[in-house]
Amino acid sequence: MSKSESRAINTLSGIKSKLKHITEDQNTARNAKIENCIGSVKVPVGIAGPLTVKGSDGTNGVYHAPLATCEATLVASCSRGCKLFESSGGVQFKILRDNMTRAPVFWFSSPQEAANFYDLVPSLLCQFQEIAHSTSKYARLVRIEPQIIGSTVHVLFEYYCGNAAGQNMVTFATQAVCDRFAKSDTALGIKLKNITVEGMRVSEKALSWGNILHSRGVAVTAWGTVTPHACQRILGSSTWDVYETLRNCKEAAIRNGQLGFSANQANIVAAMFVACGQDAASVSESSWSHLTAEFDRETEELLLSTYLPSLPVGTVGGGSVLDTQREALAILGCTGEGSKVRLAGLIASFALALDVSTAGAISNNTFAASHHKFGRSTSPIPPKL
């Protein structure tokens, strides 16, 4: 192959000329707001459920979850967990917080100058709110909180963003605040050297204790009770065996230095994020969870609860505007007012269902067998549930 032929193949048009499947969906390519878009890739979508869910936001009904995944047994296992909770009264969730953050950096020449600005920050809230609110009908600056790092002050801006995840929304609003403040007499008086819109204090797309403790996105807890009869009939294990399995796994996770604990919840977070047009890179911070198992020795019922502190989800904007993702959100009933927090609650609820099913499979040694049955290339096509 000549150099000219090699260059031609490596141009955008040359790459597209060699493709068949990626380029076939041009409608998605036209609607996508990405650079050098040549088409789209497809991920299989399975339906898990049904699951009865009640939420603090008014959610009350029977739901199915669209799971975009290539992992065999995932949909079946989640559906089995749903069946278990259905037989035991369903799942409930409560929304604990809903915010999005950005943390601009204010640069000074000395720690003393930074300390002076630190004292000033609380008095700037109203001024910053006026500027931030002028950039969006939905972004509302709720709180600002400074932290000194050397000769800089990292100020946490906490926003409420309606049904949007708000990661871009808060960036635009915060940038406007920074630009206006940099030109103010106050900035000149405090000898401000520079402002940058972010200094990674919010740990966007990265796991951090700060976001576990204070949230970045929607914080939600979900819980459900498993009866001994349903557990034995559906999982083939006793509630005590499932409890002991989870207790033992948590001990090993602690020994390994694991942050948080769950059996398998990241799979649901990732699968529902992709299906519903969420930022897939945010799975790194969103999948941290804390599963808690409580066994009642009198009734032999097993109470399972999970806490997910940082789900930066949205039902407007971003990938949620694509046709297939809109359909996935509609399956969940996550359209219209208040749908963002419902999406977060349903993610937590279906994650809990997958966890109990996974724990059951481990407790009775069927975990490997199920993956062997459906996960190998020679396996038959899994049956419809």
Image (cartoon, rainbow, N blue to C red):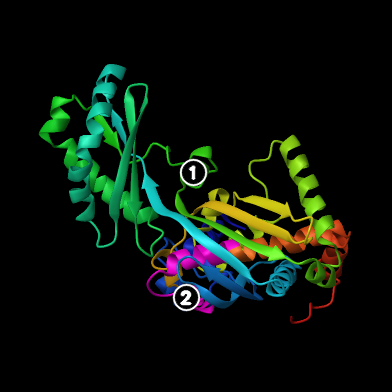
- Determine which residue is flagged by label 1: 211
Stretch of the chain drawn in magenta: 324-348
Q: Is residue 175 left or right of residue 227?
A: left
- Determine which residue is flagged by label 2: 326
Q: Is residue 9 left or right of residue 296?
A: left
Give the residue at x 85% y 63%.
237
Q: Quadrant of residue 369?
A: bottom right
User: Which label sits in the foreground, 1 or 2?
Assistant: 1
Q: Is residue 278 above or below residue 180?
A: below
Q: Position of residue 15 (x, y in %)?
A: 54, 64
Q: Quadrant of residue 145?
A: top left
Q: Position of residue 154 (x, y in %)?
A: 35, 33
Q: Position of residue 126 (x, y in %)?
A: 19, 44
Query: Mark 2 is on which residue type?
Result: Arg
Q: Is residue 345 magenta?
A: yes
Query: Mark 1 is on which residue type?
Result: Asn
